Image (cartoon, helix red, strand yellow):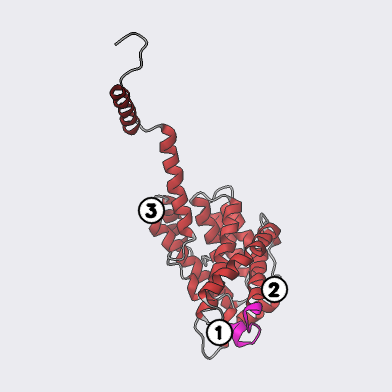
Amino acid sequence: MEPGSPAPKKSRLVHSADCEMEEAQAPSSSNAAGGVNQSLHWTQWQILDSILPTGGFAHSYGLEAAMQSRVVNDQEDLRSFVVQVLDSAGSLLLPFVHCACAGKSPGDAAAWAKLDRLLDATLTNEVARKASAAQGSALLRVAASVFAEVPALQELRRTLLGSKSVSFHHAPVFGLVCGLVGFDGEAAQRAYMFVTMRDVLSAATRLNLIGPLAASVLQHQLAPDAERMVRKWRDRDVSEASQTAPLLDAVQGCHAYMFSRLFCS
């Protein structure tokens, strides 16, 4: 072969195959880091998955009582109801999600217990208080069992179970879990609003107020409203928590007095 002539095709193919084998045998550190981040994303998505058995679908956020009280009668009423629920959750509960997630030490049991006790004193609606405690307790139990790679969850749960003054309310538990699995404060607050909207619409389908497809369409249409509520109420301290929907609170409180009911709240 003359000098300067191109290498035979076979040689180029062999060289290319050798390079591919070397790359496969020696993955770069950036790929390894990417694998860790991707694993974290799967964990974060699972928290929002409806298959996670946290008991959220046992509660209607007052929708069942609102229907029996004739406050909600059709899909237009449902749309207005969901917006009010999001506004109420944003004003009253989002500060607890934010402070539990973005605190100086998300795994600080004493600081978290203080948030939990404050929310317990803030919730004047007995039905909402019991529902919040039931959902939060279930979420922490499930998270501690599922996300075994986060030992702080197991340690914190063991510590808090020994305290009789802790109620395990859902909003601070949600913020705590999100913080420990890598959510930033804004993502955790947005996730909480998403879960709230999802659960209300799920309850509406089981109450035959709306069909599954129509509920999905409505959820998509309500996304701008949910985002508006997040921007309106995000990053607030618990000292700013307030109830903006007293009628909704009063109607939900009637749930325990209904003769026939499908949901716990």
How much space separates mark 3 and mark 2, taking CA atoms?
39 Å
Q: Count residues near mark 2 (Cα–Cα under 10 Å), then give few for <14, some for 14-19, many for 20+.
A: some
Residue at the extreme top of the image, as rendered: 3
Residue 71 belongs to magenta span:
yes
How much space separates mark 1 and mark 3, taking CA atoms?
37 Å
Picture residue at 42% right of the left edge, 47% below the top: 39
How much space separates mark 2 and mark 1, taking CA atoms?
19 Å
Look at mark 1 in the image and give the residue it sits on: 256
Look at mark 2 in the image and give the residue it sits on: 245
Picture residue at 44% right of the left edge, 38% below the top: 33
Residue 36 image offset from top left, x and y in percent: 43, 43
Front position in the image: 194 or 108: 194
Residue 121 belongs to magenta span:
no
Q: Which quadrant is home to the N terminus?
A: top left
Q: Which mark is residue 148?
A: 3
Picture residue at 61% right of the left edge, 52% below the top: 186
Look at the image and tell me whether residue 130 can be seen: yes
Instruction: Tell me the magenta residue range.
Output: 65-77
Which amino acid is tagged 1? Ala
Front position in the image: 118 or 71: 71
Q: Which quadrant is home to the C terminus?
A: bottom right
* Disc 2, SS: loop
Tell which circle, 2 or 1, labels the residue nearer the N-terminal end: 2
Which amino acid is tagged 2? Ala
Front position in the image: 238 or 205: 205
